[in-house]
Image (cartoon, rainbow, N blue to C red):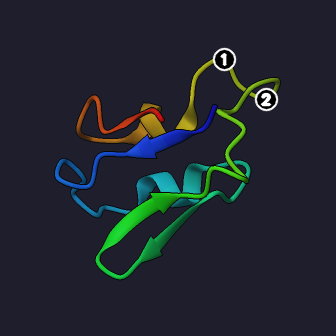
Amino acid sequence: MALKIIASQCTQCGACEFECPSSAIKFKGEIYVIDPEQCTECKEAFDTQQCASVCPVPGTCIPA
């Protein structure tokens, strides 16, 4: 299962895009989106999802 970004909570800071180890996060139009085909939820690489750990708004990067 991939993660998703709650667009209404996203501040568009871009921290998640640069932190994502699988390059699954891109800026599309006016929001950041997570490509579910690329998102690995950081499994086997990190103990926590990197996008959620750097996001300034808790609960913005959540399981899809």
**Mark 1: secondary structure:** loop
State if disc 1 and disc 2 touch (CB < 8 Å): no
Of residue 21 and residue 2, the one placed in the foreground of this image is: 2
Q: Which mark is residue 23?
A: none
Residue under the point 64% across and 57% down: 24
Where is residue 19 shown, x and y percent of the image? 57, 50
Residue underneath mark 2: 45
- The residue furthest bottom is 29
Q: Nearer the viewer, residue 53 or 62?
A: 62
Residue at the (48%, 35%) spot, across then down: 64
Q: How many residues crowd around disc 1 within 10 Å: few (fewer than 14), some, or many (20 or more)? A: few
Name the residue carrying label 1: 47
Identify which amino acid the numbered label 2 is placed on: Ala
Residue at (72% x, 53% y) in the render: 38
Q: Secondary structure at mark 2?
A: loop
Q: Is residue 58 left or right of residue 52?
A: left
Q: Is residue 36 above or below residue 56?
A: below
In the image, farthest residue toward the right: 44
